[in-house]
Image (cartoon, coloured by chain):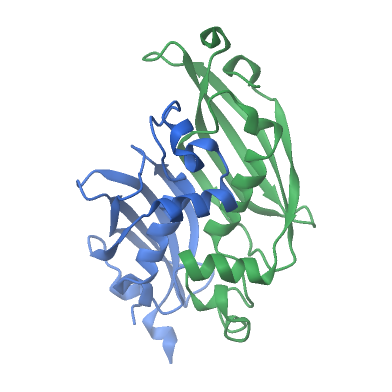
Chain colours: A blue, B green
């Protein structure tokens, strides 16, 4: 189990990988982002994506799952995001792309209001099989201190 | 159909509403954010959320669907987000909460590189049935200019 004290700046976590299928892309889009370029392969050829692309929220959500299932997912109180900044999708993610995330600790600080907790900022970068960035963001998570675990 | 020229600063769009069910919250969490406080009601009582809460990515994704189905969803080239900043979840969203979003145009500028397009920044605010903010973010979208439609 990981605590605030373990998440020192520069520490890096790697996730497993996940290959997105066309069915998964369409299923997510049908529920949460029903735009033609996420659903219809032929029509998507004439879209700004030049072909069917996954919803950006889907790419972020798949990255979240990879993170929960990584070593970082064992933080004592769970992965609880307080905010997200600089969320970018530099390129489309397609059916067949294999995603893998890397999470680096940027900073940590104790909480002034709740002495048993601290705030840790992380950068997540999810890359595809060509090492190109699919999604990147910075987030602050709320993490229990080890001393508070008694 | 809406074009860049229609998205003038201050213009505001309202979405329909959606009531989240426990099954939906667990379904999303099982696929994308399998942490106990999104899945197990009894265990979640002892979590930082003091009860079962929807994944933040789920709340954002439901907001996306409401936006796609709103008048703003009729932008000429689709809703294509380039980036997101200041994404915040000020409080947990629970089963039974009814979400509704409001989107305000913050700014617009022509694209230097692609004269047929412009960049429009938006603020989305999703509120629950008590008018409390469930999720809020700022985003920049890529929007076709009307002159380019011939």
Q: Residue furthest right?
A: B130
Q: Position of residue A6 (x, y in %)?
A: 29, 74
Q: Is residue B143 above or below residue A25?
A: above
Whether residue B48 is visible to the viewer of this picture, yes or no, is no
Name the image quarter holding the N terminus of chain B: top right
Q: Is residue B5 above or below residue A77?
A: above
In this view, A13 is above or below B127 = below
Residue B49 to residue B19: above or below: below
Q: Position of residue A139 (x, y in %)?
A: 42, 55
Do we see residue B51 in this rendering?
yes
- From the viewer's perspective, is A85 left or right of A69? right
Image quarter (top left, top right, bottom left or bottom right) of the C terminus of chain B? top right
Q: Is residue B115 left or right of residue B100?
A: left
Residue B118 appears at what percent x and percent y? 49, 18
Position in image of residue B142 (x %, y %):
49, 26
Question: Residue, x 63% and y 39% (percent of image)?
Answer: B68
The single residue placed furthest to the front in the displayed view is A42
């Amino acid at each position: 189990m990981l605590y605030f004290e373990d998440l020192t700046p520069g520490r890096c976590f790697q996730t497993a990988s996940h290959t997105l299928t066309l069915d998964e892309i369409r299923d997510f889009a049908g529920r949460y982002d029903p735009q033609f370029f996420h659903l219809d392969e032929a029509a998507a050829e004439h879209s700004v994506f030049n072909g069917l692309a996954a919803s950006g929220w889907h790419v972020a959500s798949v990255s979240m799952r990879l993170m929960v299932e990584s070593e970082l997912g064992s933080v004592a109180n769970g992965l609880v995001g307080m905010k997200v900044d600089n969320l970018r999708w530099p390129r489309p993610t397609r059916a067949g792309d294999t995603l893998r995330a890397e999470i680096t600790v940027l900073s940590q600080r104790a909480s002034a209001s709740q002495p048993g907790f601290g705030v840790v900022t992380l950068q997540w970068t999810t890359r595809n099989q060509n090492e190109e960035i699919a999604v990147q963001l910075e987030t602050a998570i709320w993490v229990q201190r080890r001393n508070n675990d008694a």
